[in-house]
Image (cartoon, grey):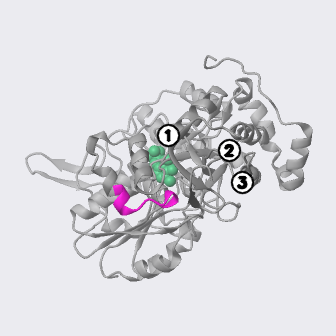
Amino acid sequence: MPRGAIRETAQPTSEACADFLARHPSYAGTGALDKLRSTEYRRLDELGQVYLDYTGGSLYGDSQIQKHFDLLRSDIFGNPHSANPTSAAMTEHVERARRHVLNYFNAGDDYILVFTQNASGALKLVGESFPFARGSSYLMTFDNHNSVNGIREFARARGATVRYAPLVAPALHLDTIRLDQLLSDVDPARDNLFAFPAQSNFSGVKHPLDLVAKARTKGWHVLLDAAAFVPTNKFDLQAVQPDFVPVSFYKMFGYPTGVGGLLIRKSVLPKLQRPWFAGGTVNFASVQGQAHVLSPNEAAFEDGTLNYLSIPAVEIGLRHLQSIGMDVITERVRCLTGWLLDELLALRHGNGRAMVRIYGPVTTQFRGGTVTLNLYDPQGHLLDYRRVEELAGEQGISLRTGCFCNPGAGEIAEGLTEEDMRAGLTMGPEINLLSFVRMMQERGHKSAGSIRASIGLVSNFADVWRFRQFIESFRDQTRLTIGDVSFDIDSCRIIRDGA
Ligand SMILES: Cc1ncc(COP(=O)(O)O)c(C=O)c1O
């Protein structure tokens, strides 16, 4: 079916809707989102698309792009930060958007906002500017996006100790005892950084935000990756007080792409050392004198020309979320996720074996709407998740598969060990997911990679119902398997073929 064609889609029966509402009565209070979906997001249903990749990126409403285009057409905007009228007009919009973001996250007078290209750009700024040195530490949770893992290269290059705090399978929450030990094992006189995600982009786990205060009292600066949390949760900087918070705005409200932000606590600013200077970041620079004086605050971090025409759309997007109300979004995501988890866990093959293995919490306590899973055949053979994604795509269902740039959570979820990973790395450039999965099956009957369905801003019951129907279609399916090792989901054990 060509992209963009109108698709006739099966809809949940009135009994299924009534059953869902009986199990999740608070969903009824989120009806404003149904109205919004039928107006601003009408294209989703007109095109029969089931969008379940909100952790990849959220979706924009029609009014966001309309308001942005209206603004662009209403004035002449030049490159900001000059005194000429077109530049000054743009500067005003950029600074207005900056103030709006700071107010949205209740920054008070304690934070600055640096506009970046995305969350990864924000994380790179932290990595290159944090004063890692011999004797200081960089501690991360296993559960982190690669753009947080990547900071370890800056830490290592400057002689800091790099360590990881483990997770506990199958719920994939933090091993709090081990984390306590790691947090305590630090020289508080040094510049130490602890990084964790407020919500996992792999498992949807919401890690406890009070870890920020705990780590700070033990002598750590804290980087709280909020990229996967803020799209569906309220976040209050004054209440949590991390030192660094990266976000990507497209993950919150879909448009614009290419703009992210780094919130930096003002008190940590004097410690940060930028490794270079660029256009826009200096108050003064001389060729003959071969010296420069960095600008203060956010200007020191915004290299070159900002994505200035897009930045006003950030304020428009935040107002869009505010007009809906974050509590409404959080509650709707909670109801849909709870229903989906219960339904997936209840799916059984004809022989009674579970069809779906969920990675992460199986209830909505301490988790958001990111649901990661694998499918198994009646004998417990893993189904090829890439083929599952293709089949979903044929039905207009957008999922994501792989490891979602979060290798640590994936390794723990699949029971992969350090030795397994080192063995995989010996394949050199030949390594790819299939060859790695084959090698893992030979080594210890494990798999690597999974399917992620993520629920967000304008998800509705029909979306999760259609996804459930799609997954149910794999009942008693014996094709699409990869590897010949069997796994019993209920007991989490390897089983003999045919047992
Ligand atoms: C938790 C988390 N951190 C960081 C990122 C990186 O975001 P970006 O790709 O927009 O730089 C992502 C993206 O999925 C994420 O989920």
> Where does the magenta region start and end?
412-421
Is label 3's Cβ within 8 Å of ligand 1?
A: no
Foreground label between 2 and 3: 3
Give the answer, above or below, for where 361 lies relative to 18: below
Q: Amino acid at mark 1?
A: Ile
Type of amino acid at the residue the image marks with label 3: Leu
Query: Which corner quadrant holds the N terminus?
Result: top right
Q: In the structure shown, which secondary structural element does the residue marked by tag 1 occupy?
A: loop
Residue bearing mark 1: 311
Residue 345 badge: 3
Taking the image as shown, residue 345 lies to the left or right of residue 143, namely right
- Please report the residue visible at 39 percent of the width from the left and 40 percent of the height from the top: 306
Task: Choose the circle earlier in sequence order: 2 or 1.
Answer: 1
Q: Residue at x 68, y 34 (%)?
A: 50
Q: Which residue is mark 2?
A: 457
The one of 50 and 211 positioned closer to us in this rendering: 50
